[in-house]
Image (tube, rainbow, N blue to C red):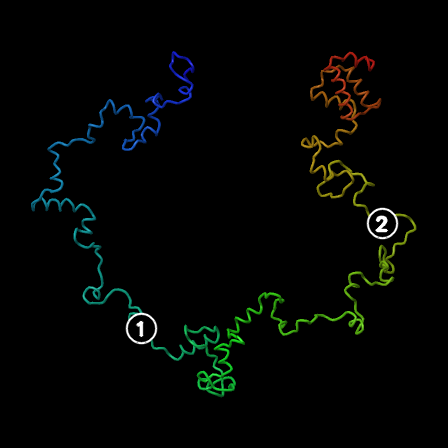
């Protein structure tokens, strides 16, 4: 950006903040040849970046690709108009082509010769190949207008009775044995007068309509469906004859009437209960057996049976067999399965850290983990403090006393610890 407010540059703050496109520098050619935007101009030929600089030196735009043929190799007219062979050349060409198997079996302009010998009935006679089918022996008239037998109609009638399948537009006939002719008989009762092409005048009023009493005739199946749907201000008809019952009808019977008729319980008694004092007493066989000969009468405060956890027994070995499902009180609890204790990946349990061990075993364990540099007098004093004057101590107590000593060492107060414990 040019410096503003200086007369020697003849510029202003506006010129410094306004970007001039004419002064924009172009991308160097050695970089632009790798960009696709260089060849996006309309009508410009795409060039690979490997030959971009070669076009300027090789002048490829003025060159023609290919090799020019010599005059002795033939011209285009010789290719379009091939040379006319004479009879001798044609025979020589046929002789040279005989070495190929395809020219012998399938000559040009002829069918392929497989040298198959057919029987005389096919070569001398007019017998065709193959076997005549049944359809070829039937005339076309029987296919268009088949001659149906009585068995076909009997089977069709049986299919109609079993599957109720009728032809399109065919009237459904149930073959009722009527004593009358249904084609000439009119069903129903005649009305008061004859009108409207033989229909009763009562039906005529319904069909033509009346201003005072408007009625409409519809399909019965449609009306039955409407009666089973929800209607405004009415309960839904479930098809159980509820439409024929009065609106003020109350379902069920009065409980007072039922109590007079026979002894029954009301809904309130069912919910609250109406048991006698004897029925509310506990069962006679509760916590005891009432079967003679099986009663365990004891005047001691004891429980019969074997406990699930045998605290009264001790396991013979720490490594219990998988076949032994008895719990001696030392099994792991469910909390240890969800939150395993420390060092469980090393097969160490909390009991291993609290078990009492001799001085030799403890020193052997701590020497193996790198505490063998401590003086013997100090280790003897640490074991004495951890064991409280006894001959055994646990790993946790020995570790706690050892950590206390190491804290004094790290702070530079080892002499103070030694004087504190009389060393």
Considering depth in this image, is 101 or 293 the residue closer to the camera? 293
Residue tagged by mark 2? Answer: 304
Considering depth in this image, is 99 or 50 the residue closer to the camera? 50
Looking at this view, name the residue that lies furthest to the front: 212
Q: Position of residue 51 (x, y in %)?
A: 29, 26
Q: Is residue 337 above or below residue 410?
A: below
Residue tagged by mark 1? Answer: 144
Mark 1 crowd level (few <14, some 14–19, many ≥20, 10 Å Cα): few
Q: Secondary structure at mark 2?
A: loop
Looking at this view, name the residue that lies furthest to the bottom: 179
Q: Is residue 353 above or below residue 90?
A: above
Query: What is the distance, in whole Å, between disc 1 and disc 2 at their CAs?
Result: 98 Å
Q: Earlier in the sequence, mark 1 or mark 2?
A: 1
Q: Position of residue 79 (x, y in %)?
A: 13, 40
Mark 2 crowd level (few <14, some 14–19, many ≥20, 10 Å Cα): few
Query: How many numbered dots are placed on residues in this image?
Result: 2
**Which residue is located at x 22 percent, y 63 percent?**
119
**Which residue is located at x 84 percent, y 23 percent?**
390
Considering depth in this image, is 102 or 292 the residue closer to the camera? 292
**Residue 414: assigned label:** none
State which quarter of the image contains the N terminus: top left
Q: Secondary structure at mark 1?
A: helix
Answer left or right for 404 relative to 130.
right
Q: Give the label, 1 or 2, closer to the camera.
A: 1
Residue 262: name its quadrant.
bottom right
């Amino acid at each position: 950006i040019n410096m503003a407010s200086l007369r020697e540059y003849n510029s202003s703050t506006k010129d410094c903040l306004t970007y001039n496109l004419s002064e924009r520098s172009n991308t160097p050619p050695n970089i632009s040849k790798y960009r696709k935007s260089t060849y996006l101009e309309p009508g410009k030929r795409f060039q690979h970046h490997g030959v971009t600089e070669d076009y300027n030196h090789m002048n490829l735009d003025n060159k023609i690709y290919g090799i020019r043929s010599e005059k002795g190799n033939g011209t285009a007219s010789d290719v379009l108009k091939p040379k006319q062979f004479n009879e001798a050349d044609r025979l020589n060409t046929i002789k040279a082509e005989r070495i190929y198997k395809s020219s012998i079996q399938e000559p040009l302009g002829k069918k392929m010769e497989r040298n198959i010998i057919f029987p005389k009935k096919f070569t001398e006679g007019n017998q065709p190949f193959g076997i005549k089918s049944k359809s070829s022996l039937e005339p076309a008239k029987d296919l268009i207008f088949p001659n149906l037998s009585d068995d076909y109609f009997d089977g069709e009638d049986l299919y109609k009775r079993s599957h109720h399948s009728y032809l399109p537009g065919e009237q459904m006939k149930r073959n009722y044995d009527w004593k009358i002719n249904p084609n000439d008989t009119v069903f129903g009762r005649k009305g008061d007068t004859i009108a409207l092409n033989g229909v009763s005048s009562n039906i005529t009023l319904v069909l033509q309509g009346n201003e005072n009493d408007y009625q409409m005739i519809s399909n019965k199946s449609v009306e039955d469906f409407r009666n089973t749907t929800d209607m405004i201000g009415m309960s839904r008809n479930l098809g159980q004859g509820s439409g024929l019952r009065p609106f003020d009808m109350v379902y069920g019977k009065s409980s007072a009437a039922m109590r007079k008729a026979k002894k029954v319980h009301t809904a309130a008694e069912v919910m609250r209960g109406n048991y006698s004092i004897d029925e509310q007493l506990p069962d006679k066989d509760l916590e005891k057996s009432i079967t003679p000969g099986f009663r365990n009468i004891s005047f001691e405060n004891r429980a019969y049976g074997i406990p699930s956890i045998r605290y009264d027994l001790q396991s013979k070995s720490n490594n219990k067999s998988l076949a032994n499902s008895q719990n001696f009180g030392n099994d792991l609890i469910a909390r240890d399965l969800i939150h395993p204790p420390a060092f469980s990946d090393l097969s160490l349990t909390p009991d291993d850290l609290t078990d009492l061990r001799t001085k030799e075993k403890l020193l052997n364990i701590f020497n193996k983990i790198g505490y063998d540099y401590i003086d013997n007098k100090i280790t003897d004093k640490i074991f004495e403090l951890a064991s409280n004057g006894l001959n055994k101590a646990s790993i946790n107590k020995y570790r706690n006393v050892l950590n206390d000593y190491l804290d004094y060492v790290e702070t530079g107060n080892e002499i103070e610890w030694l004087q504190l414990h009389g060393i």
